[in-house]
Image: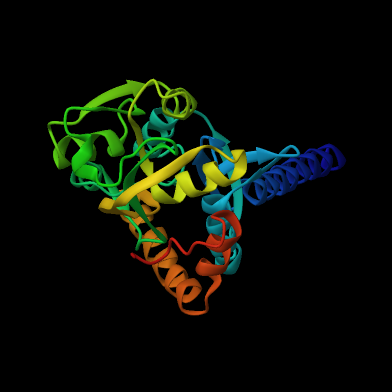
Amino acid sequence: MKKLILLAGSIVLITILAACGDSGSSEEGSGDNVLQAGTTAQSYPNSYEENGELVGYDVEVLETAAENLGYEVEWVTTDFSGLMGQLETGRIDTVANFVAVTEERAESYDFSVPYAYAGATIVTHEDNDFTDLEQFKGRTVSGVLGSNNVKNLEAFDPEIEPRTYETRDGAMNDAINNRVDGYVNSKSALIAEIELGDLPLKFVGDPFVYEDISFPFTKNEEGAALREEFDEELEKLREDGTLAEISEKYFAGEDITVQE
């Protein structure tokens, strides 16, 4: 009887120890040092796939800051609205996709310090004689549906008629083929796109508005803690020139980390 009791006790003890061991492995697998980040992987040169790898300005800035802070980044890719929805519900920790800070977004998310600035501007076909933004009054300018660039254009000059498209390609192609008078986007993205495709487009005037580009975090205690960590690290990357170096790598030598 004593032997049976001792045997039963040993089995229980082994079971408890095994359970404890499994629990430890599970916690290690989840990892407090893993940062779940979202991106579309379709926004050249900010976030896109090259040779099967996720690359781009925003991707590299986030991964550099995360690595310095001791985080491993796990990427989640989907459309932009889906990313912001996942962030709001806490399914991901942040979004790296050239997210502009707006009053509306600031009500829902806790934004880091800026790591870039987006200057909304208009390009036109190089054969056109536009030299000033005033010349677009009563003209048609293409842009991406729901984008801040289109909203900023409408606020800048209500006399300019925006024509919206589901994608950048659609909006840009109509400008290239002179089906519209101009195309509005951030100057940094336009510089990269024009150089990549050797496109017959030219800039008209200076950007008519600048926006801060930042990493959004959830509005809770955990999100605030992450934002504080990234604020400090982004400032270091700005001071030591890393942000400018990454920018020049993706934007044809342009430093988009400062306002012109």
Q: Position of residue 162 (x, y in %)?
A: 25, 26
Left-right relation of 33 to 152: right
User: Toward which corner of the image does residue 7 lie, by quadrant?
Assistant: top right
Please say which color scheme the image uses.
Answer: rainbow
Q: Which one is in front, 2 or 25?
A: 25
**Residue drawn at point x = 58 percent, y = 68 percent:** 68
On the image, the x and y values in percent for residue 102 come to: 23, 46
> Residue 163 at what x, y percent from top left?
29, 22
At 39% from the left and 47% from the top, the residue drawn is: 203
Of the pair 246 and 136, the residue shown nearer to us: 136
Q: In this image, 196 relative to 153: left or right?
A: right
Residue lying at 74% horizontally and 37% vertically, measured from the top left: 52
Q: Is residue 202 visible?
A: yes
Residue extending farthest to the bottom is 240
Residue 251 placement, left or right of 220:
right
Where residue 226 sits, quadrant-wise, is bottom left
- In the rendered image, residue 38, in percent from the top left (x then y), is placed at 50, 40
Quadrant in the picture for the C terminus: bottom left
- Asked which quadrant contains residue 95, the reply is top left
Q: Nearer the viewer, residue 4 or 155?
A: 155
Residue 170 or residue 236, whichever sits in front: 170
| Numbered disc total | 0
Does any portion of residue 32 appear in the rendered image?
Answer: no
Q: Quadrant of the N terminus?
A: top right
Q: Residue furthest right?
A: 3
